Image: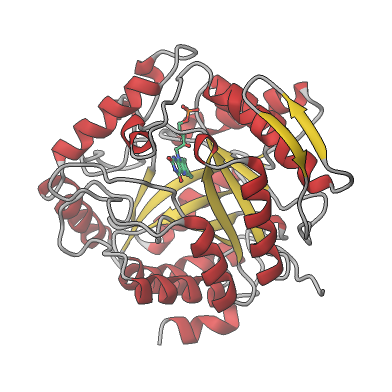
């Protein structure tokens, strides 16, 4: 079977992943009626728009219940492996991550599912390995997560997954978390030795896990001035294992023709319409599983006060740990250039409403980043279609 290039590993110096379009809410903690409702046909439209515009990959979020509060954002979500197979069949070039919670799916199950998507897409899949943070979501499955051991289980899980995809004779596995017999899979993935792996973490244990298992690490850069130090810390972890890991962050984008319009809209959905009950739930659930390897006050997800942005305040309707960029296309492009200069390899991007907000980002911000030398011009021809 012919393979196509996987943009997850492609030439763009600063890559973008369409984030969370498989869930409702737009990754804001907002009750604003304009928020993303996650209707399937709209999800397809957003993913096809990203594909045609040259966005590098789609990164769906694995969720099993919502974030409480009135809005209960992320309460409606499409499962990511099946989402990947379906969107993979409807797109032509974009990379597609599927997100898997370690305690909920065996390595053999995921190896087979990922191989399926890799064949459907002719080699465009990637795997996001998530060790879990919200015990309530795992209660849905009757499973408990151990805050101190979740990454240890994740590492054993990864080793089995990698061994399965090496191919060869069926094997037995006698580990601490898994006792397996006659493990094998067929077909193997088209991408060899396996499709790219990402993980998302901020803690030292999360970084150590990524240093051993991941090709890309998504981490919170809640303060741009700290970005170079964060990138260096991840690279120091990776160097211990003789590896390199591309470091990404996650951004919420509010881009309008003037700063005033952008600031007013951010204030509206993230301050006036903030779902404070939901924010309290997130912080409480994050604290419960944060682990003891880093003080909770230093974590951007358990301490919303640690989140900053370049101009103005951070409002309560902002997902803790997700860097918010508010401004004109020049402002957005400037902050992304700064991220790239700090050593970041890219960002996952989310919008309050993808179909309303993405065309402007595609039309105005992507060309600025091309001119800055951070992105190739591959999506340029499609842009007129995307914004028509
Ligand atoms: C880009 C990104 C994607 C994530 N995707 C998921 C997801 O799909 N499901 C989930 O439960 N958690 C997800 N998380 C949360 C992380 O897996 C993790 O819990 C968080 O980054 C904290 O990690 P730490 O405890 O190692 O600091 C994501 C985080 C980021 C930044």
Q: Is residue 233 visible?
A: no
Q: Is residue 310 visible?
A: yes
Q: Count all numbered tags in the image, as a single digit.
A: 0
Q: Residue furthest front?
A: 181
Tell me residue 115's x, y (percent): 70, 58
Residue plotted at (38% across, 47% down): 63
Q: Residue furthest right?
A: 168
Asked if residue 57 is positioned above or below residue 384 in the image, the reply reads: above
For this rendering, which residue is in front, 111 or 268? 111
Quadrant placement of the N terminus = bottom right
Q: Is residue 149 above or below residue 17?
A: above
Task: Judge left or right: residue 290 versus residue 212.
Answer: left
Quadrant assignment for the C terminus: bottom left
Q: Dividing the picture into quarters, in which one does residue 297 lie? A: top left
| Left or right for 143, reference 367 | left
* Colour scheme shown: secondary structure
Point out residue 68 in the picture as x, y percentages from the top left corner: 20, 42
Q: Nearer the viewer, residue 343 or 240?
A: 240
Q: Is residue 290 above or below residue 386?
A: above
x and y, in percent, of residue 75 in the image: 27, 51
Please, is residue 118 above or below residue 308 in the view? below
The structure residue drawn at horizontal position 15% and vertical position 53%, both measured from the top left corner, is 31
Q: Quadrant of residue 263?
A: bottom left
- The picture places residue 121, in percent across and down from the top left corner, at 66, 70
Question: At 71% from the left edge and 68% from the top edge, which residue is drawn?
Answer: 119
Camera-side residue of 19 and 224: 19
Q: Going by the image, does 170 lie left or right of 6?
A: right
**Which residue is at 64% across, 24% downward?**
208
């Amino acid at each position: 079977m012919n393979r196509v290039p996987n943009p997850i590993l492609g030439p763009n110096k600063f890559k973008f992943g369409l984030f969370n379009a498989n869930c409702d809410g737009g990754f804001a903690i907002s009750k604003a009626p304009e928020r993303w409702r996650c209707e399937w046909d709209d999800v397809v439209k957003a993913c096809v728009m990203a594909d045609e515009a040259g966005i590098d990959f789609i990164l769906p979020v694995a969720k099993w219940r919502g974030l409480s509060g009135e809005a209960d954002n992320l309460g409606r979500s499409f499962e990511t492996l099946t989402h990947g197979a379906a969107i993979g069949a409807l797109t032509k070039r974009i990379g597609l991550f599927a997100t898997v919670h370690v305690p909920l799916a065996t390595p053999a199950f995921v190896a087979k599912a990922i191989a399926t998507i890799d064949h459907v897409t002719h080699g465009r899949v990637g795997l996001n390995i998530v060790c879990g943070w919200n015990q309530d979501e795992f209660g849905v499955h009757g499973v408990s997560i151990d805050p101190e051991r979740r990454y240890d289980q994740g590492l054993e899980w990864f080793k089995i997954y990698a061994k399965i995809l090496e191919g060869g004779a069926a094997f037995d596995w006698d580990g601490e978390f898994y006792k397996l017999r006659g493990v094998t899979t067929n077909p193997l993935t088209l991408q060899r030795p396996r499709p790219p792996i990402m993980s998302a973490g901020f803690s030292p244990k999360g970084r150590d896990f990524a240093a051993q298992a991941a090709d890309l690490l998504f981490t919170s850069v809640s303060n741009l001035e700290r970005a170079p130090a964060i990138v260096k810390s991840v690279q120091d972890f990776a160097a211990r294992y003789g590896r390199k890991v591309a470091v990404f962050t996650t951004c919420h984008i509010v881009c309008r023709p003037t700063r005033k319009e952008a600031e007013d809209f951010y204030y509206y959905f993230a301050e006036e319409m903030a779902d404070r009950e939901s924010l309290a739930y997130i912080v409480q659930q994050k604290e419960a599983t944060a682990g003891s390897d880093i003080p909770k006050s230093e974590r951007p997800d358990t301490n919303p006060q640690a989140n900053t942005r370049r101009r103005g305040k951070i409002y309560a309707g902002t997902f803790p740990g997700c860097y918010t960029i508010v401004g004109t296309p020049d402002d957005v492009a400037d902050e992304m250039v700064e991220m790239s200069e700090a050593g970041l390899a890219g960002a996952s991007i989310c919008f309050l409403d993808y179909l309303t907000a993405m065309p402007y980002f595609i039309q105005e911000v992507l060309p600025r980043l091309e001119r800055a030398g951070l992105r190739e011009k591959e999506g340029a021809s499609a842009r007129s279609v995307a914004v028509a």
